[in-house]
Amino acid sequence: MLKTVADPDQAASVTASLVEARDLGIKRDGRWLIKGVNLAIRRSEIVTLIGPNGGGKSTTAKALLGLIRADAGSVSRMPGLKVGYVPQRFAIDWTLPLNVTRLMTLTTSHGADEVQEALERVGAGSLAHSEIHTLSGGEFQRVLLARAIVSRPDLLVLDEPVQGVDFSGEIALYELIGEIRDELRCGILLISHDLHIVMAGTDTVVCLNGHVCCSGTPRDVAATDEYRRLFGHRGASALAIYHHEHDHAHDHCGNVVSLDGHADSASVSSENRDA
Amino acid sequence: MLDDFFVRALVAGIGVAIVAGPLGCFVVWRKMAYFGATLSHSALLGVAFGLLIGIDPMLGVAIQCLLIVPALVLLERLSPLSTDSQLGILAHGTLALSLVIFGFMTWIRVDLTGYLFGDILAVSAREIAYIYTGGAVVLGVLAWIWRPLLAATVNAEIAAAEGLRPERSKVIFMFLVAATIAIGMKVAGVLLILSFLIIPPATARAYAATPEHMAIGAIIVGVLATVLGLNASNLWDTPSGPSIVVAALVLFIVSLLPFKRFFVSKRTPSREVL
């Protein structure tokens, strides 16, 4: 239905949200975990949930996915919405023999080509025949991401996708997530602790602490008082740090190589230092 | 062919092994061994009620198993006790209750040993028909829910988020385990039937690369244990059901021996470091 519209940007603005929460509240043992949350994710949009531990990030994501029922307000999903989900860290019991290829077809059937393509997309092409239990934390996260994108979902939900990935791998993984968004034109809901990376690669940031403290573009959010109160100095400098660290890159031997076409971000970072 | 009691025992045992293998894999993967023990212990209550109201004990077990699953699901929601303790209460509570009911029924001489440990040599052609028709239904339903059940076993949230309804397949699976216990009771009894569900999958694990391989491997191990056990019991005049279980145990121990690595090594390719 969407594919018939010529201009993707126009389609995104005209069509309704993939998933939308209105005044969402979740209650556990008489306590509101989250309350009054309004949130929408549209096609080709990366929405990132940030906030302190226990602020309700995962709870909100699960409610949007329909894994937990709303105690107040409502969640509406586009009919026939295809979801790819990478949950927070979990273990697969050793008694279950599972190789990467078999994990890739866990919820939907795919040919060997599609599976290999998705694995290569996340840089895990050589892992197709590995046993799940032999993977490192970072490899497992990549495979889970490949599994979530192999069925070309409309909505990708990633709960702390960089767990077990080292810092340079983290940046690469966030860049990869941006590329996946461009290729699949899917909406992405991201949950992360890594403020400085998140703040650079995201369209909309929603800061959750039981309720929506603030939301908007990363720069708007970083400028709010609530954000500064929650994250302090670390949060205030998050944008600047990211852009500073990205005025160069490293090749495979660790040598510094220059990055072209980043004049924009350099000016952004200086603006932030001034602010 | 079914005239010979030994052939009947063989056919019945193989039938139960074929059904129990794939189902048992999920019992092992989902860590539901104690749940299986509870279902099988409580099956004796079904026998007791069956005898009390004068219906076929196997039918009594089937009805009992249909009732115990909702009871367990209900108890899980009502009681804050850990599942483990709830299962323990139900398993031994129902076992004791059924023994008490047997004690009241002074008008019937109950072959308790047969119910507890099975009486595979006394299997009738009708019971074989039950095993194979019931078993076909169980395996058919299992094949139908295979993908959602497996996805739910790996991660229930992924399964739910991607629209596979893990809770529904879990409840259906519980009924399938109950049905398997009902049809396997004659072969191994309420105290040993669980070994048909647990030992063959545990043995097959060492050689399996995918869940499906493990399910087929569990069938092969179960059938092998039945053939070996029954022949051994014929040879040395040992009790038949327990002999099958001992044969399965021997196969399991063999699977733990280090020489299995010769088989396994070739499917673990070397990986490039990312």
Image (tube, helix red, strand yellow):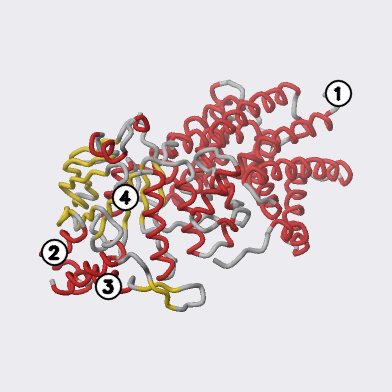
Q: Are marks 3 and 4 in contact (CB under 8 Å)?
A: no
Relative depth, front residue between A52 and B207: A52
Q: Are marks 2 and 1 in contact (CB under 8 Å)?
A: no
Q: Residue at (76%, 57%) from the top-left corner?
A: B263
Comparing labels 4 and 2, the label whose residue is closer to the camera:
2
Element at badge 3? helix
Q: CA distance from mark 4 to mark 2?
A: 22 Å
Residue density around tag 2, few if under 14, some if 14–19, many if 20 or more, within 10 Å:
few
In the image, taking residue B150 as reference, residue B254 lies left or right, namely right
Amino acid on which the number 4 mark rests in the picture: Leu
Taking the image as shown, residue B65 lies to the left or right of residue A159, namely: right
Residue B23 locus on image (x, y percent): 61, 39
The x, y position of residue A121, in whole percent, is 50, 53
Q: Nearer the viewer, mark 4 or mark 1?
A: 4
Please rate how many residues cluster around mark 3, counting C-alpha atoms within 10 Å: few if below 14, some from 14 to 19, many from 20.
Answer: some
Q: Residue at x 55, y 35 (%)?
A: B178
Of labels 2 and 1, the one closer to you: 2
Nearest to the observer: residue B197 or residue B268: B268
Question: Quadrant of residue A40 in the image?
Answer: top left
Q: Residue at x 68, y 60 (%)?
A: B269
Which residue position holds label 1?
A: B1
Let me know if marks 3 and 1 both belong to one chain.
no
- Which chain is mark 1 on? B
Within 10 Å of disc 4 (Cα), the crowding (few <14, some 14-19, many 20+) is: many
Q: Earlier in the sequence, mark 3 or mark 2?
A: 2
- How far apart are the two marked residues, 2 and 1, measured between alpha carbons? 85 Å
Q: Are marks 4 and 1 on the same chain?
A: no
Q: Which badge, 4 or 2, is on the more N-terminal residue?
A: 4
Residue placed under numbered mark 3 in the picture: A241
Horizontal and vertical percent position of residue A259: 37, 69
Camera-nearest label, 3 or 1: 3
Report the residue marked by disc 4. Answer: A189
